[in-house]
Image: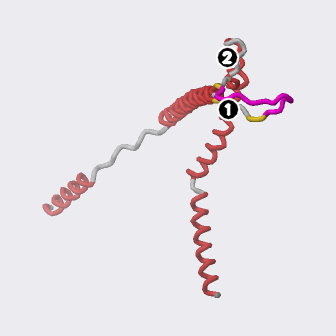
């Protein structure tokens, strides 16, 4: 029993070591930061769509809201007391249109954000390249050094 516990502890230590290496890799942390920022960015864009663009679009279309657009397949059945007997069956295509608009705006915003980051990164790289010192002139190649040594040895032999 003691042998089994030691083997289990050793496997657990190895697994924990692998997990620690995995979790501390730069790519995993970068991805986690990207997911968090993406979630926050999505909230901003959703607010832009719901709070600014859709009301403006509703004003242009005469107050129509996309979320209320639907195609009723089977209307709700209500008894004489006003209680709902069976729910309405409807295709909520307005909600679908809303989600498509959200997607397009998020894609548009992400495109310009990536483009702006690429421009800033290119500018920083160009500035770094301009500040970088000139590379040292290349020294002689191995063949040139060997030829020079050979010539020196010939001169020494002839003396």
Q: Decide: few, some or many residues near mark 2? Use Cα within 10 Å; few <14, some 14-19, many ≥20.
A: some
Residue extending furthest left?
A: 158
Q: Residue furthest front?
A: 80
Taking 105 as reference, is 143 left or right? left
- Going by the image, does 43 lie left or right of 129? right
Lower position in the chain sequence, tag 2 or tag 1: 2
**Residue at the spot 19% in from the left edge and 61% down from the top edge:** 153
Q: Where's residue 71, x and y in %?
A: 64, 25
Spot occupied by residue 90 in the image (x, y as percentages of width and height) = 66, 30
Q: How many marks?
A: 2
**Residue for badge 2:** 57
Q: Nearer the viewer, residue 57 or 115?
A: 57
| Residue at point 67%, 13% (across, down) | 61
Q: Is residue 119 shown above or below 19?
A: above
Query: Which is more toward the observer, 136 or 117?
Result: 117
Residue at the limit of the structure toward the right, as seen here? 81
Q: Quadrant of the C terminus?
A: bottom left
Categorize mark 1 by other alpha carbons within 10 Å: few (<14), some (14-19), many (20+).
few
Q: CA distance from mark 2 to mark 1?
A: 27 Å
Residue 89 vertical placement versus 35 (above, below) = above
Of the two numbered discs 2 and 1 in the rendering, the one whose residue sits closer to the viewer: 1
Q: Can residue 109 be seen?
A: no
Which residue is tagged 1?
A: 89
Assign a secondary structure to mark 1.
strand
Residue 131 percent coordinates (x, y) = 51, 35
Q: Is residue 76 magenta?
A: yes
Residue 107 magenta? no
Give the magenta part as a residue range: 72-84
In this orientation, which residue lies closer to the viewer: 71 or 66? 71
């Amino acid at each position: 029993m003691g042998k089994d516990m030691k083997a289990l502890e050793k496997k657990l230590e190895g697994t924990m070591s692998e997990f620690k290496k995995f979790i501390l890799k730069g790519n995993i942390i970068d991805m986690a930061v990207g997911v968090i920022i993406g979630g926050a960015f999505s909230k901003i864009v959703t607010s832009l769509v719901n709070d600014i663009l859709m009301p403006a679009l509703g004003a242009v279309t005469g107050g129509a809201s996309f979320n209320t657009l639907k195609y009723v397949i089977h209307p709700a059945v209500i008894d004489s007391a006003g209680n709902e007997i069976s729910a309405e069956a409807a295709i909520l295509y307005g909600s679908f249109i809303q989600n498509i608009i959200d997607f397009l705006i998020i894609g548009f915003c992400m495109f310009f954000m990536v483009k702006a980051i690429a421009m800033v990164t290119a500018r920083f790289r160009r500035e770094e390249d301009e500040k970088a010192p000139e590379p040292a002139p290349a020294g002689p190649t191995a063949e040139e050094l060997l030829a020079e040594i050979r010539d020196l040895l010939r001169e020494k032999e002839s003396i």
